[in-house]
């Protein structure tokens, strides 16, 4: 069956360190993968998109990698700040056939001052 | 300001009543979506629409109905609301279905009593 897995346990890191979040998928052939940030009681906000033929994408302190062999995307936040505390969702669009964006369950990040 | 607006933010209904959630966007987006978010389950697609007067069922369409009479509006009706833990409903829009980043509304939390 198709699955998108993100670590359901919260990730706690010290301010200033690099946070790394993982998104693994099974039985998908993603055309692209997206990362969103969600704050409590609010809708997700788009952060980054990486396509199947791209290995890495950067935006300010954010970096996303995409390994189609490992079927995994890593999301990094460098020099993390308490304001980065939120839940981060990965989402992917499966290529071919029925086009639909599917979301993972998200990982909660807590940056400790 | 351009964006996507959901109303109301909190909604209470008696069991068995129909309830309609509003979603309006002024981004000139063709595609609109409704998701339901439950704790630990991520976002699950209820319905989506690629164009006016057309919509498709998502993964959990049973018990819901939608209409898309105008490009800007995509209301969701919960038919015969069941007593369950409060659910968080999110509306989103994008330029094209499954093609680009999704913009989300602030969400509506529905409690059935």
Image (spheres, grey):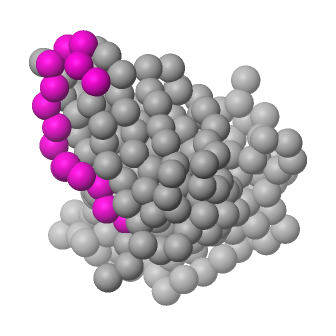
Q: Quadrant of the N terminus of chain B?
A: bottom left
Verify whether residue B6 appears in magenta.
yes
Q: Position of residue B99 (x, y in %)?
A: 70, 63
Depth order, front residue of A84/B109 = B109
Task: Write down the region rendered in magenta.
Answer: B4-18
Is residue A93 positioned above or below B30 on the image?
above
Q: Position of residue B69 (x, y in %)?
A: 51, 51
State which quadrant residue B5 falls in.
bottom left
Q: Is residue B81 left or right of residue A104?
A: left
A87 or A9: nearer the viewer? A87
Q: Is residue B2 above or below residue B58?
A: below
- The residue depicted at 26 percent of the width and 45 percent of the height is B108
Task: Find residue B22 and report its horizontal and vertical position in percent.
Answer: 32, 49
Q: Is residue B105 magenta?
A: no
| Left or right: residue B7 compared with residue B98 | left
Quarter of the figure that contains the C terminus of chain B: top left
Nearest to the observer: residue B81 or residue A50: B81
The spot of residue B94 in percent (x, y) is 57, 64
Q: Residue at x 19, y 49 (%)?
A: B9
């Amino acid at each position: 069956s198709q699955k998108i897995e993100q670590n359901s346990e919260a990730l706690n890191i010290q301010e200033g360190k690099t946070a790394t979040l993982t998104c693994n998928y099974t039985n998908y052939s993603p055309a692209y993968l997206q990362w969103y940030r969600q704050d409590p009681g609010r809708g997700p906000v788009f952060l980054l998109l990486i396509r199947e033929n791209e290995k890495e994408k950067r935006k300010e302190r954010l970096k996303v990698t995409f390994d189609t062999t490992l079927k995994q995307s890593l999301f990094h936040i460098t020099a993390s700040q308490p304001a980065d505390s939120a839940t981060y969702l990965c989402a992917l669009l499966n290529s071919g056939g029925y086009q639909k964006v599917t979301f993972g369950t998200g990982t909660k990040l807590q940056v400790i001052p | 300001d351009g964006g996507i607006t959901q109303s109301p933010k909190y909604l209470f209904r008696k069991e068995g009543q129909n309830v309609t959630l509003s979603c309006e966007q002024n981004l000139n987006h063709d595609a609109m979506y409704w998701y339901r978010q439950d704790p630990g389950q991520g976002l699950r697609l209820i319905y989506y629409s690629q164009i006016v007067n057309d919509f498709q069922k998502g993964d959990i369409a049973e018990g819901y109905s939608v209409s898309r009479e105008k490009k800007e509006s995509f209301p969701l009706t919960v038919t015969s609301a069941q007593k369950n833990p409060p659910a968080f409903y999110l509306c989103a829009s994008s330029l094209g279905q499954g093609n680009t980043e999704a913009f989300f509304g602030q969400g509506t939390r529905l409690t059935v009593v």
